[in-house]
Amino acid sequence: MTARSVAIVGASPDPGKYSFMAVQRFRARGWTVWPVHPSAPEVDGVAAFRDLAALPGRPDLVCLYVNPRIGLGLLDAIAALRPLALWLNPGADGPELAAAAQARGLRTVEACVLVALGQGDPLAVAGVVPLTS
């Protein structure tokens, strides 16, 4: 299987933040991780990108760790990337954001990605791709 890629929007350089933990756990599972933060140069030793337009490719998954109001403003850029799914973590989720994402054709998952990572490939856990053994 080719390594999957994830853009973690709102990735924090603070080791106490869940978004920092997501960077670590995705990397530990072999994913290519693209932290997105407007001012942090890196997150856990991984070069960060100022915005989604700066990403070097199409992520399989976009994982949000930002306020839903900010997320609403990012939906067009996320939709342009055509990820397999948009993951809305607790605090970054909400009915308005989920509905707006789905209206743009984005497959949306509202759950904690850290929990899903503990169960395997988040995309498979969420039913976006088939489970593999």
Image (tube, rainbow, N blue to C red):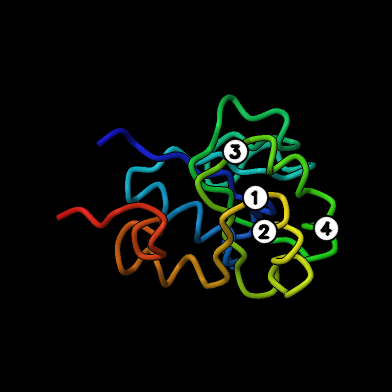
Residue at image point 64% right, 52% down = 11
Name the disc covering residue 105, or none.
1
Q: Position of residue 29 (x, y in %)?
A: 32, 50
Q: Position of residue 122 (x, y in %)?
A: 40, 59
Mark 3 touching mark 2, by CB under 8 A? Answer: no
Q: Earlier in the sequence, mark 3 or mark 2?
A: 3
Between disc 4 and disc 2, the foreground one is 2
Residue at image point 73% right, 75% down = 95
Mark 1 touching mark 2, by CB under 8 A? Answer: yes
Estimate the spatial distance between the alpha carbons at disc 3 and disc 2, rounded to whole Å. Answer: 12 Å
Mark 1 touching mark 3, by CB under 8 A? Answer: no
Q: Name the amino acid, label 1.
A: Gly
In which quadrant is the N terminus drawn? top left
Asked if 87 appears above or below 46 in the picture, the reply is: below
Q: Name the amino acid, label 4.
A: Ile
Q: Secondary structure at mark 4?
A: helix
Camera-nearest residue between 83 and 120: 83
What residue is disc 2 on?
102
Q: Secondary structure at mark 2?
A: helix
Camera-nearest residue between 55 and 107: 107
Between disc 3 and disc 4, the foreground one is 3
What residue is disc 4 on?
70
Residue at image point 81% right, 57% down = 72
Residue at image point 72% right, 56% down = 103
Q: Residues within 10 Å of mark 1 (few under 14, many from 20)?
A: few
What residue is disc 3 on?
82
Q: Secondary structure at mark 3?
A: loop
